[in-house]
Image: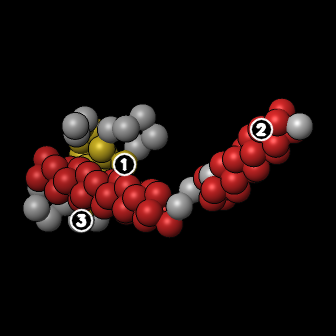
Amino acid sequence: MMTHRLINWALAGLAALIMSSAYLLDGPSDHQAAIDTAAAERAARREVLAEARFARAAQRVCGENAAWQLREDGAVQCLTKRGHRTAVVAVR
């Protein structure tokens, strides 16, 4: 009779343990979602700043009044105000 009582207490304790840890099965918390959102915003901000730095560097290399366009190979094609190609430069 004592073993039945011991087994019942053990099963009740196990059920309580499982039910008390069920919140862990819900997936990521709101805190984790906020951290992921902030990381994505930081990455987007870094990308925008890098593009702006690249554009400033390309403008500096081509000249203040010159236009430029990015080529497929990653080089910058400098253009005159009338659209004539002048130089191909690599901006890093």
- The answer to whether mark 3 and mark 2 are in CB contact below 8 A is no
State the SS at label 3.
loop
User: What numbered label is drawn on residue 81?
Assistant: 3
> Can residue 9 be seen from the camera position used here?
yes
**What amino acid type should be assigned to the residue bearing mark 1?**
Leu
Residue on which the image places disc 1: 70
- Residue 84 % position (x, y): 30, 54
In three-dimensional space, the C-alpha distance between marks 3 and 2, rounded to whole angstroms, equals 90 Å
Work out whether 41 lies above or below 76: below
Toward the front, the furthest residue is: 1
Mark 1 burial class by Cα count in 10 Å: few <14, some 14-19, many 20+: some
The disc, 3 or 1, on the residue closer to the chain's N-terminal end is 1
Residue bearing mark 2: 6
Q: Residue at x 50, y 66 (%)?
A: 30
Q: Distance from label 1 to label 2 (Cα)? A: 76 Å
Disc 3 to disc 1, how far (Cα)? Answer: 16 Å
Q: Are discs 1 and 2 less than 8 Å apart at CB?
A: no
User: In terms of depth relative to the viewer, which is nearer, 83 or 10?
Assistant: 10
